[in-house]
Image (cartoon, grey):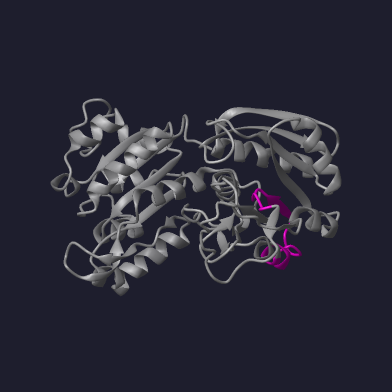
Amino acid sequence: MDLQNKNILLGVTGGIAAYKTVELLRLLKKAGANVNVIMTDSAQKFVGKTTFEVLSENPVLSDLFFDTESSVKHIDLATRADAVIVAPATANILAKFAHGIADDALSTTMLAVTCPVIVCPSMNTNMYQNIRVQRNLDILEKDGWHILDPDSGALACKTVGAGRLPDPWFIFDRALAMLTKKDLSGKKILISAGPTVEAIDPVRFVSNHSSGKMGYAVAKAAEKRGAQVTLVSGPVTLESPVGVERFDVETCEEMADQMLANLDHSDIIIKVAAVADYKPIDPKTSKIKKKDNNKGLSISMTENLDILRLIGGKKTKDQFLVGFAAETDDLEKNALLKMQKKNLDMIAANIVGSSDSGFKADTNKVKLFFKDGSFFDIPLMDKNKVANILIDYVIEKMG
């Protein structure tokens, strides 16, 4: 999901972390949102209005009485907003929000807001831990506002502890989740992603080109849509999706064990991982040294456990199983055969080898096949969008 045609109200208050909000604004705009910024007087001591006006392409509201455009602009902004983000939120503004004080443009506007709200506290550690600040946060949370806990670390005031504004990407991610339909609420989804590796010796291994990007995109999309997501991941360099329980594995056997351990209480299983189909029969405990006779090296391989087929044989009638097929030719024939052999409800198949689709790429072109004989072509697009379309069809086919 993107933020196309969404109206986001961005409140900025007087904390040193206000400079981070500039990056948050860029992320919101890049996702297609229309962003209006409201700044307190103190916020302008840290970042000027012009910066936010140029990046948002909208005038910044900072004074209720000197706005020449409309005498009730703050009401208009509050009414049109699909979501509000206040970052950073100082102790002062939290007190105003919690007790209904309206003495500046931001606090007055917030009394007219009816849409979802994210508040990002940022301040000195002792201030943040103060019982009065915590009491105000409790009030706002009970009122239904989303409170993002601050990060811990070295602060501008030279103290170390909780109080840092979370990274802009994290705030953006949680805003996206807040605005995403929760059509998977109550569902438990088990997802596998990335490659597996099988040791030849302590230095070398057998694997494949999977980056894990597609599986991680599915995990992120499912979490944002309200699912409880368990992700079993092979070795990748990707950040863990927010709100997702992640188990790291290396070998096919480890992945199988973790998938089976979580199978019984999963409603939907989506196996995106590219498991190494073969493994060395006799992996060495010491590094295999290069020979001088130029005869090369032969490695005897044996077939690995077929995780998808194993799950297909164990799944119940109430569970929905999705597989992936990466092919180089005969896409439809191979995908349908795999779906039948492994008792799948749905399979996502794509041709690999292209630089803009499949392994490592940020985009993908996929064809979905279903147990009822129907199919759907997903044209080339960002893997995050592919993930959401895939989930749409899972929900449709599950009824």
Q: Which stretch did the figure color magenta?
A: 257-276
Using the rendered view, name the quadrant where residue 29 is placed. Answer: top left
User: Residue 251 vs residue 158: left or right?
Assistant: right
Q: Position of residue 322 (x, y in %)?
A: 74, 46
Query: Is 267 covered by the magenta stretch?
Result: yes
- Residue 290 percent location from the top left of the image: 51, 59
Question: Can residue 204 be seen at all in this image of the molecule?
Answer: yes
Check the image and report above or below for 201 versus 322: below
Using residue 164 as the reference point, say whether residue 340 is left or right of it.
Answer: right
Residue 121 relative to residue 379: left or right: left
Number of marks drawn: 0
Q: Quadrant of the N terminus?
A: top right
> In the image, residue 133 lies at what x, y percent?
31, 67
**Residue at 52%, 41% in the rendered image:** 360
Say left or right for 289 vs 265: left
Residue placed at 16% from the left, 39% from the top?
A: 48
Q: Residue furthest front?
A: 293
At x 33%, y 35%, the residue is 36
Residue closest to the far left: 45
- What is the quadrant of the C terminus in the image? top right
Residue 34 magenta-drawn?
no
Image quadrant assignment for residue 10: top left
Image location (x, y in percent) of residue 26: 33, 37
Q: Vertically, is 184 above or below 32?
A: below
Q: Nearer the viewer, residue 248 or 79?
A: 248
Is residue 72 at all visible to an observer of this figure?
no
Above or below, 324 against 30 in this view is below
